[in-house]
Image: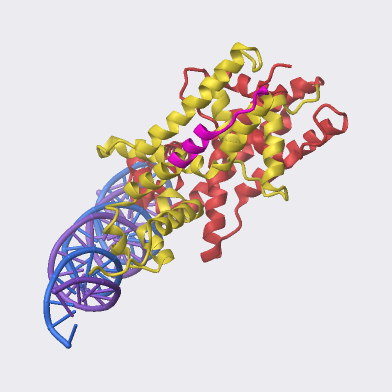
Chain colours: A yellow, B red, C purple, D blue
Amino acid sequence: MPRKKKFTVEDLYHQTHLLLMKVGYDQFTFSLLADELSVSRAAIYKYYSNKDVLISDYLTFEMKKLLEEFDQMEWSSDREEHFNQLFELIFNYSDVHQLSNVFTQKMKMKHEKIQFKENISKELHERFFGHIQSFILSCQETGFIKKELPANLLINMIFHSVMINTSSDLTQKERAGYIREILAHGMFQK
Amino acid sequence: MPRKKKFTVEDLYHQTHLLLMKVGYDQFTFSLLADELSVSRAAIYKYYSNKDVLISDYLTFEMKKLLEEFDQMEWSSDREEHFNQLFELIFNYSDVHQLSNVFTQKMKMKHEKIQFKENISKELHERFFGHIQSFILSCQETGFIKKELPANLLINMIFHSVMINTSSDLTQKERAGYIREILAHGMFQK
DNA sequence: TTTTAAAGTGACACTAGTGTAAATTTAGTG
DNA sequence: CACTAAATTTACACTAGTGTCACTTTAAAA
């Protein structure tokens, strides 16, 4: 009986990602999204009542993927290699972290005016955060990472660093390698 | 003859700063700004034809202050102390760097549609960038900073790091100290 | 006190996004 | 082939920001 759908949830999520990265949260509109999907704006409203619900769903979807990868990871017994694995995982999802950060901040601001429903992607983000925190704390206990540095700050440094987008001619991998080196051992010669 | 002004350029710049930090570029409007200044929206249009011109002027003003401080700085002969001074200077203007970054990016995007006049604050930002670059390169020549790290990347790491705003209970100074320590010597125990 | 010109305001037309409801299209069913 | 119901579109009313212009206010000069 029903008519064929013109776009899938995957299409929607994919274009949501591209559009968010391109224009940012504030300029993200259903009009632009509809254009990308070659569909009318109202069609999207049939699935999502507004952009916040859509973005929240999209980010939840991505964070779940990330957490699955995280849980299934076979961690190296070597501490530095373990750190590298962790860093690479974060790096591969840097877009999602960035989007999630911005979105959470925007929701906080709206909260003051509108009582908005809890943000699930934020919770997932924090769960991931917790995983990493315990790793860092254990590293500090065994003296592998400097004890005086606050774990929260370390995590924030890592998350921020992976968002750096230099316009230079480095490949993603090269850049990741250099950043990891700085975070781990610093920019000064020993 | 003339009537007393209800607000000064300083008021305008100050509220521009506060509002930009509070709501961000996209949600920055003359209506909100006018409210803060207890003045009508149209009054601001007498001085600035749109928000881009205002923000550009404000950032130019800030960057000029920064460059002056930079030029008048008495640099320590100790390399690490020199680095610390540089870091502190950047840190003290972290808001401005952040705002300048966002603004430049937004202008780039608009450029595609509207042919926009050159962005002076961007030029100043890049001049400051150049100053730092030469310091880093000289440090690399003398082997004080690791030679293999691209200078551009180092600068970007520093600029990004100063923007980190952890919600923890650290003071600005403490946070700056820890971040500097990580960038300089890394988070791992030697 | 009158005049003047800068400073500030109110109102208008325009643009763009939001959310909704009625109308239309379409793939499969009987 | 007509019917059905989901999928989609069109049209509308509403909200909010933008830039402009005629008009009003006001501090000081004459």
Residue B114 in view here: no
Q: Which residues are magenta?
A: A64-79
Q: A79 or A56: nearer the eye?
A: A79
Q: Is residue B45 above or below residue A164?
A: below
Horizontal and vertical percent position of residue A35: 40, 66
Name the residue at 73% across, 25% down.
B83
Up/down of A148 relative to B33, above or below: above
- The answer to whether residue A19 is visible is yes
Drawn side of residue A29 relative to residue C2, left or right: right
Q: Nearer the viewer, residue B131 or A167?
A: A167
Q: Position of residue B84 (x, y in %)?
A: 70, 23
Answer whether residue A71 is magenta in the image. yes
- Image-based side of B129 in relation to B16, left or right: right
Q: Is residue C29 above or below residue A68?
A: below
Q: Say which quadrant the C terminus of chain B sits in.
A: top right
- In this view, the residue in front, A20 or A140, is A140
